[in-house]
Image: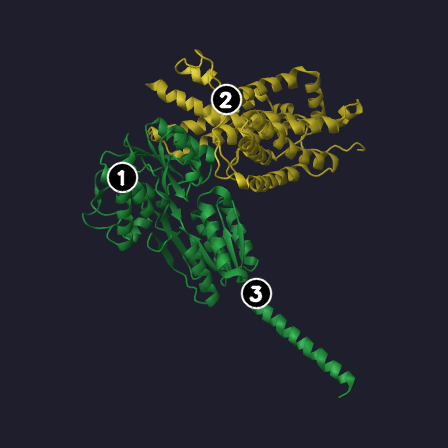
Chain colours: A yellow, B green
Amino acid sequence: MIIDLIVPALLTIITASTPLVFAAVGEIVVEKSGVLNLGVEGMMVVGAVGGFAIAIITDDPVLAILAGALSGMLMALIFGLLTLYFYSNQVATGLALTLFGIGFSALLGHKFVGITFEGLPKLYISGLSDIPGIGQLIFGQDVLVYFSILSAIAVTWFLGRTRWGMIVRAVGENHDSAHSIGFSVTSVRLSCILFGGAMAGLGGAYLSLAYTPLWVENMTAGRGWIALALVVFASWRPWRAFFGAYLFGGITIIQLYAQGLGVDVPSQILSMLPYLATIIVLIVISRDDSRLRLNAPACLGRNFHTSG
Amino acid sequence: MSEFRKLTLLTLAMLASFLVGMFGVAHADPLKVGFVYVGPIGDHGWSYEHNQGRLSVEKEFGDKVKTTYVESVPEGADAQRVINQLAAKGHDLIFTTSFGYMNPTIQVAKKHPKVHFEHATGYKRSKNVATYSGRFYEGRHVAGLIAGKMTKTNIIGYVASFPIPEVIRGINAVAIAARSVNPDVKVKVVWVSSWFDPGKESTAANTLIDQGADIIMQHTDSPAPVQTAQKRGVWALGQASNMSSFGPKAHLTAIIDNWSPYYIARTKAVMDGTWKSGDTWGGFKSGMVEMAPYNSAIPADVVNLAETARKGIISGSVHAFTGPIKDQSGKIVIADGKVADDGMLAGMNFYVEGVEGKIPQ
């Protein structure tokens, strides 16, 4: 039956895409406030080890998820303090955060290598979850999957429809004007950086708690960088980032399934496809300079000095 | 002798002894040995085992050596920079431990003719670049026998990294061994285009299980496939190190790479000035390849079969590639009674009968 092939593939696509959704949606908020944090990979990997460590110690999935978010947030706090209060270069600090995160998580995770965890519990609604095919897809996921979808919707609404969202965007577009009409640029940016850290931490925790419930060093394997690319791919729109993540996850998984089925397409081409798609979208959106400028926050990557 | 002259002499004597001492210290300068790893040392697979080898060099020679390692070095331009830096910093012996470091190693070696280089799994050598590898296909042969006996669905799922001879040889060794005890076995291969990506490896394992595989083998470095097998209730065979803690029920055995004896011997050779370039390809016999403890769920006769094969390989009576061996089209590639020579093994670029799909070109 074809459905027997499609449903498992779709299930894996969801697990492959969810960490990207978290990290990309979080980074969009950060970048909308005018801060470029390239430390997503570092925050994710620390979130992964933090979540996993607490899962093993307490055996409580809720605490583990919170620990993942908190670990990412603590990493983001380092970044925030350095860039907002010590005016360090955002690009360099973000890169350093990734390098630090990979090393630091290896140190923290040393004791947890080789231990496994049964994974996050999945939703089960009697009747609904038993519907063949779609039952498990829609009603049988773990809490983080639903939360990732919710976060994309919530961030879209927040940035577009709320006063606070407008303030974030104002700070990102022109920090001098925002400052002159009385908004605290630094505290708005710090809140956004912390939110981004928590989201990246959740993305990492999803890897170590649900995707492959174990800890190995560097287990994010570059997903933080993909999330960063997705932000540009999505031209800073959360729902586009959400679909971008699913497109990327989808192509990655489908090529693995295609190989197993003996489809005769070179696997290198298939594994190249997600990146190729990103490049094409980048070309399309950057062809129209005004459109790109309309979406990219004008103050992205620029430090704010109150005196200046 | 006046007091003054005595004092002067004493000072001179002290100075002299100090100088001799310094010279002595300079002479006992530790040998600097560098290691470049493709993955993190905590991968619990390939790089982990190379690092175990490094630790055993430190243990063996104590303060006579000083080792350095750089982990997670991408294959390509970065590798060349890292290797060059190690050479420029005065390392006497440098182990580069991934296939993709081959050209960078050769390049850097040209610029540093006095430094000794050791490249794992490659085939390009020069005066100061030696190559070494394990005959992991011997381990795959034993693993294949067990897999052939343990499978119920007759499908072995194989999570593979890159289509290089080393990996293809492993796939073929498994197919030949498994089909020798169970002619209905098929090997399904999924390429993940990475040596280390737990998420992708786990997905590939899931894919294979969804398509009927009840044995998961891997030629990637993370324990994720073993864990996935455990979760899905199928068997798994570990890669590079004992991965049983990641899936104690699923883990049948693992092919273990043991680099320690080689690393110790080569370090000693540099110390003694007897180091020469060459190619070392060690298997069960030299201890470079080992099997992890067998899972207690494997029936005694299967363990027996595996052990007989392992001992046979050591004594030379068994070879993983013994003819007649056919390729996928049914053409005989190794004639009846012949065994594949090292040249054929080193350049293997075809699938044998029983492997499904095509090698990505």
Which chain is mark 1 on? B
Q: Residues within 10 Å of mark 2 (few under 14, many from 20)?
A: some
Q: CA distance from mark 1 to mark 3?
A: 52 Å
Which residue is identified by label 2? A142
Residue type at tag 2: Asp
Q: In this rendering, would B308 be left or right of B55?
A: left
Q: Pointers 1 and 3 in contact (CB under 8 A)?
A: no
- Residue B123, can we see it? no
Residue A193, picture quadrant = top right
Q: CA distance from mark 2 to mark 1?
A: 38 Å
Q: Are marks 3 and 2 in one subunit?
A: no
Residue pictured at 54% horizontal, 23% vertical: A144
Quadrant showing the C terminus of chain B: top left
Nearest the viewer among B51 and A221 is B51
Where is mark 3, residue-wise?
A: B29
Per the image, the residue denoted by label 1 is B178
Q: Quadrant of residue B205?
A: top left
Compute the Cα span from label 3 to label 2: 58 Å
Q: Could you tell me how many numbered marks the image carries?
A: 3
> Which image quadrant for residue A265?
top left
Q: Tag 3, which secondary structure?
A: loop
Indicate the position of residue A5 as horizontal and vertical percent values: 36, 22
Contact between marks 3 and 2 (CB within 8 A): the answer is: no
Which kind of residue does numbered mark 3 sit on?
A: Asp
Crowd rating for badge 3 (residues with CA inside 10 Å; few <14, some 14–19, many 20+):
few
